[in-house]
């Protein structure tokens, strides 16, 4: 149905709204809240100093040219999304505990694809 040009946008929009509805219900039943944030430039923005720099998608490490931090691109984006969510609630971003994010297990993508994930 998504191949139909006239209906594709409506179909995709309804799927996303149903997903967010189901996710908010699940969060509520767990005593949590769902906060939507704009994910734009989260992997290009430094989670420490806020510097934004262009990066090709093939580059997996974020190396900030301003403050010198070197962190996995996905961890950097996750930190930025978390900070935006905290700010959106009106809370200070000093509540963010960085220690768990800094100690993440580094897993090679080829190990996961080949089914040899160390997380099993």
Image (cartoon, rainbow, N blue to C red):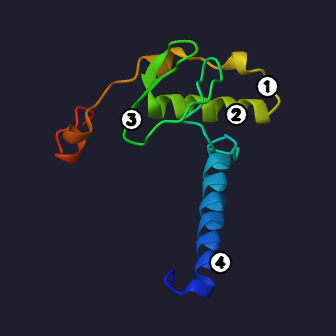
**Circles 3 and 1 in contact, beta carbons < 8 Å:** no
Residue under numbered circle 2: 84
Please say if the residues under marks 2 and 1 sit with CB atoms less than 8 Å apart.
no
Q: Secondary structure at mark 3?
A: loop
In the image, what residue occupies the spot 48% across and 29% down?
75
Q: Nearer the viewer, mark 4 or mark 3?
A: 3
Q: Earlier in the sequence, mark 4 or mark 1?
A: 4
- Which residue is the site of mark 4? 10
Q: Nearer the viewer, residue 88 or 62?
A: 62
Q: Quadrant of the C terminus?
A: top left
Q: Which residue is mark 3?
A: 59
Kindly identify which numbered label has been placed on residue 91. 1
Spatial CA distance of label 2 from label 3 is 23 Å
Does 94 appear above or below 105?
Answer: above
Q: Residue at (22%, 37%) from the top-left corner?
A: 117
Q: Is residue 72 above or below residue 110?
A: above
């Amino acid at each position: 149905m998504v191949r139909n040009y006239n209906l594709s946008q409506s179909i995709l929009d309804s799927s996303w709204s149903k997903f967010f509805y189901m996710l908010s219900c699940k969060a509520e039943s767990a005593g949590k809240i769902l906060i939507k944030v704009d994910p734009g430039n989260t992997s290009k923005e430094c989670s420490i100093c806020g510097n934004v720099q262009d990066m090709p998608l093939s580059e997996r490490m974020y190396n900030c040219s301003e403050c010198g931090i070197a962190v996995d691109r996905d961890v950097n984006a996750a930190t930025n999304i978390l900070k935006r969510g905290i700010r959106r609630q009106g809370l200070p971003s000093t509540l963010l505990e960085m220690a768990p994010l800094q100690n993440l297990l580094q897993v090679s993508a080829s190990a996961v694809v080949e089914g040899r994930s160390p997380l099993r």
